[in-house]
Image (cartoon, rainbow, N blue to C red):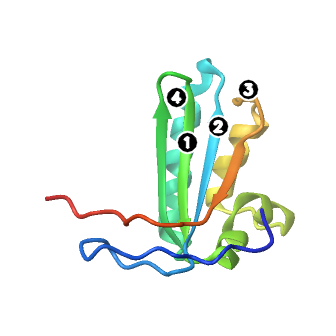
């Protein structure tokens, strides 16, 4: 992950939930072996349940499936870069923090369910508006 986050220039729409100006988004693309799609999805959903209950600094955690490529994409939003670094899997692994969320993520890699290394991107918002409420 980068060592510094550029300044945030976004504003929040009045219908959007409030979020910190320093929020950090992490997008992780997982190239999955087709025969392991169900196992990967099940593990990611278990990880998400654990993260929702145990990582208050993680504001958003969603899993998407790209039918065209067979990839799964994780979208994570954290309060700030420091929180993202604290909770993100590669840092927890280095620090020996093997917990519920990381346990499920590790199994995906250890069992060879991916066809290549995860592609991890850290994003900083430059403009636009946040999530709207359903109407």
Q: Nearer the viewer, residue 2 or 104?
A: 2
Question: Badges 1 and 2: C-beta atoms under 8 Å apart?
Answer: yes
**Mark 1 neighbour class, 10 Å CA radius: few under 14, some 14 to 19, many 20 or more:** some
Separation of residues labelled 2 and 3 (CA atoms): 8 Å
1 or 4: tag closer to the N-terminus: 4
Separation of residues labelled 4 and 3 (CA atoms): 15 Å
Of the two numbered discs 4 and 2 in the rendering, the one whose residue sits closer to the viewer = 2
Numbered label attached to residue 115: 3
Image point 61% across, 25% down: which residue? 36
Image point 81% across, 60% down: which residue? 93
Separation of residues labelled 4 and 2 (CA atoms): 13 Å
Separation of residues labelled 1 and 2 (CA atoms): 6 Å
3 or 1: tag closer to the N-terminus: 1
Residue 71, horizontal then vertical, whole percent: 58, 31
**In terms of image quadrants, where is residue 58?**
bottom right
Q: Which residue is mark 2?
A: 30
Q: Which residue is mark 1?
A: 73
**Mark 4 neighbour class, 10 Å CA radius: few under 14, some 14 to 19, many 20 or more:** few
Q: Residue furthest left?
A: 135
């Amino acid at each position: 992950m980068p060592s510094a986050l550029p300044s945030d220039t976004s504003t929040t729409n009045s219908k959007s939930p409030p979020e910190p100006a320093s929020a950090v988004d992490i997008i992780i693309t997982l190239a999955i072996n087709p025969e392991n799609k169900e196992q990967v999805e099940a593990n990611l959903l278990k990880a998400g349940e654990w993260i929702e209950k145990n990582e208050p600094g993680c504001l958003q955690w969603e899993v998407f499936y790209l039918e065209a490529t067979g990839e799964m994409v994780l979208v994570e939003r954290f309060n700030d870069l420091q929180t993202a670094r604290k909770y993100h899997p590669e840092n927890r692994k280095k620090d020996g923090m093997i917990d519920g969320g990381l346990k499920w993520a590790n199994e995906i890699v250890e069992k060879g369910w991916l066809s290549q290394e995860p592609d991890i991107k850290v994003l900083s918002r430059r403009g636009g508006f946040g999530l709207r409420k359903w109407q």
